[in-house]
Image (spheres, helix red, strand yellow):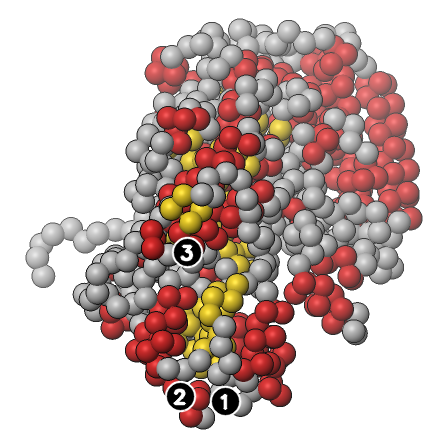
Amino acid sequence: MATMAMNVALRSAMDVMLERDDDVVVFGEDVGYFGGVFRCTDGLQAKYGSNRVFDTPIAEGGIIGVAVGMGAYGLRPVVEIQFADYVYPALDQLISEAARLRYRSGAEFTAPLTVRMPVGGGIHGGQTHSQSPESLFTHVCGLKTVLPSNPYDAKGLLISAIEDNDPVMFLEPKRIYNGPFDGHHDRPIVPWSGHPLGDVPDGYYSVPLGSAAIRRAGSDVTVLAYGTMVYVAEAAAEESGVDAEIIDLRTLLPLDTETIEASTSKTGRCVIVHEATRTSGFGAELAASVQETCFYHLEAPIERVTGWDTPYPHAQEWDYFPGPERVGAALTRVMEA
Amino acid sequence: MSDSTPLRFHVPEPSARPGDEPDFSYVEVPAAGSVRRPDVDVDPAEIRDLASSMIRVLDEADQAVGPWAPDVSSDDLGTGLRAMVKTRRYDDRMLTAQRQGKASFYIRCTGEEAIAVGQALELGPRDMFFPTYRQQGWLIARDWPLVDMMCQVLSNEKDRLHGRQMPIMYSARQAGFFTISGNLGTQYIQAVGWAMAAAIKGDDCIASGMIGEGATAEADFHHALTFATTYQAPVILNVVNNQWAISSFQGIAGGTRSTFADRALGYGIPALRVDGNDYLAVLAATRWASERARSNWGPTLIEWITYRVAAHSTSDDPSKYRPFEEWKAWPLGDPIDRLERHLIASGEWSAEQGERLRADVGEEVQAASREAEGYGTLLDGRAPSAKSIFEDVFEEMPPHLQRQRQQMEGG
């Protein structure tokens, strides 16, 4: 057991899997010799050689395209898209190819890829280094979408994703690579070293895909969150005094609807929080799912607290970011409804 | 206004449209045997001229001539001829089935049979072919069961792809035939990835990717060349230039400014431009590229010059955009006729044998068709089960799909 930051835990997951499975290969822009702009693959090329860990041309469509071919051959590619904002040139290969290969070939060919990408804002990244495109992936049949919130889960989920025989989109909230962040950007940065989920086993373990975790038990309202927003929700609950039950979804698809239903049926109230833009965001799917399963338990309208439907601005990022004040206000509103 | 010249927008036009005389004067046809054959370890920079010439083996007297004439037995040529004839007969039968309403759609490869058949017989059993939709000849050359192919086209109970794919989008891993996409160009970069994987694992098999000249405009084409040259992937990158992408002539993909083989030169990839209707040239060029790849000399791009004789698909009417029977003026002839004439000229074949071959193949296709239609066609509704649509989305069916399947069943 060691204290690890989230980027270190992710590196540890890849290290473990490169060691365990000769078919695992890791590649992407700047991930080889240099070790990635967020250091997630630091040292892996030196340890496993450039046959297993290597740099690629700046061509996301090419990166996913060769990964599909490698997966069909029998390798287990783990690729990094440097920022989620750069994934769009690869959508054809992801949507029409990786996600469909098993289906269209009657399982003759499969695409056991893991596609890692940093998401979210709060690092002055502006509109091209801050986006959260998870709902683009959850809308595609054949893709799984994972979004961890802490080092322990990040490593265990990444190992599950690599072992999965289908393509997994693995979205990493970049603002919490180095520590949990509750949205109070004016306060000192908190490292993972003080956090219980920063304690990460050195070796192999896994966290199953499709399973949510309850981060804070509560009785007043269920908060559905993932990634950075888990910490924002925790801060909002403490600061508003609302006894919220906070569910960290961890995997968006397949979605752990049982945990959501059990909690919302109990509390009768639901607030959904995500950093992505609102319209057609994953919160819409969550809200629909909650009303389908819990309508007769609900005592207030479901609230969504999200990024605004604008590009992620640079200078005004804290006006965009759904911080603890906005989440706290929503908690208070649903209690007053 | 200033006195500057107004800018002029250029939209290329083909040499002939409906009502015009066909005009293939833009296709320069060098004499067979006139192009040199470099060693496979040649520096790509030394053979740039091969991207703008045309490798041809069969001459006007139907003899195999020049340095590219491959060492191939007449038996093997007979195998190739049979596969091409069978492919054409198969296409005719499937077109009829579509016209009868038994299949929703079909695509013929008339005039292009030599390319897929030649590659199928020249490459190894463990090599992987990443086809487009006009390479059914590969499967037939590898003796893949016609009934299996037909069941896919008919989307019937025996369709191994369970009715999920449009007709002709076969998948046959055991035949080294990658699942066909409906999106153009995607398989090209995947072929490079497959070849990279083979190199990473120290394997001894290679990949061959196909793309049409029209789809070279897709980013995947350029990704494929970038990755193939960067990692020196053991891959053959084929461009089938059949002159037409549905209604767009090859100039709409930039083909009037340089050859498609020329595209490779900027990437440092050696390129051959080859008469795709010359079966012996197909074997020879494939062998050269394959030897390069297997010897760790990296990728080769081959532009195959051919002509799409048939409509793009059963949903297309070429008389709307190109001269009626333009194919009759195509200067490179027909691949089946040319190979057959060569075998006859070599004393290895006769017109009677040709007739017997056609009769045999006709019976084989007819028998297969009877059997396949016995498993169902579009007309009798014997399609794969509705609930099977939920399978193979993932390896294991997640809860939301289980629920949706129950909903479909009225649960």
On the picture, is B135 further left or further right than A1? right
Q: Amino acid at mark 2?
A: Arg
Which circle's residue, 2 or 3, is located before the other in the chain? 3
Work out whether disc 3 and disc 1 sit on a shared chain: yes
Closest to the observer: A139 or B227? Answer: A139
Tell me the quarter of the picture where residue A326 sits.
bottom left
Q: Residue B336, image x and y in percent?
A: 70, 25
B235 to B320, vertically: above or below? above
Q: Are marks 1 and 2 in contact (CB under 8 Å)?
A: yes
**Chain label for disc 1:** A
Q: Residue A105, image x and y in percent?
A: 68, 44
Q: Residues within 10 Å of mark 1 (few under 14, many from 20)?
A: some
Q: Are marks 2 and 3 in contact (CB under 8 Å)?
A: no
Describe the element under mark 2 as helix, strand or loop.
Answer: helix
- The residue where tag 3 is placed is A196
Note whether residue A46 is visible.
Answer: yes
Which circle's residue, 3 or 1, is located before the other in the chain? 3
- The residue where tag 1 is placed is A300
**Chain label for disc 3:** A
Closest to the observer: B224 or B70? Answer: B224
A315 to A330, vertically: above or below? above
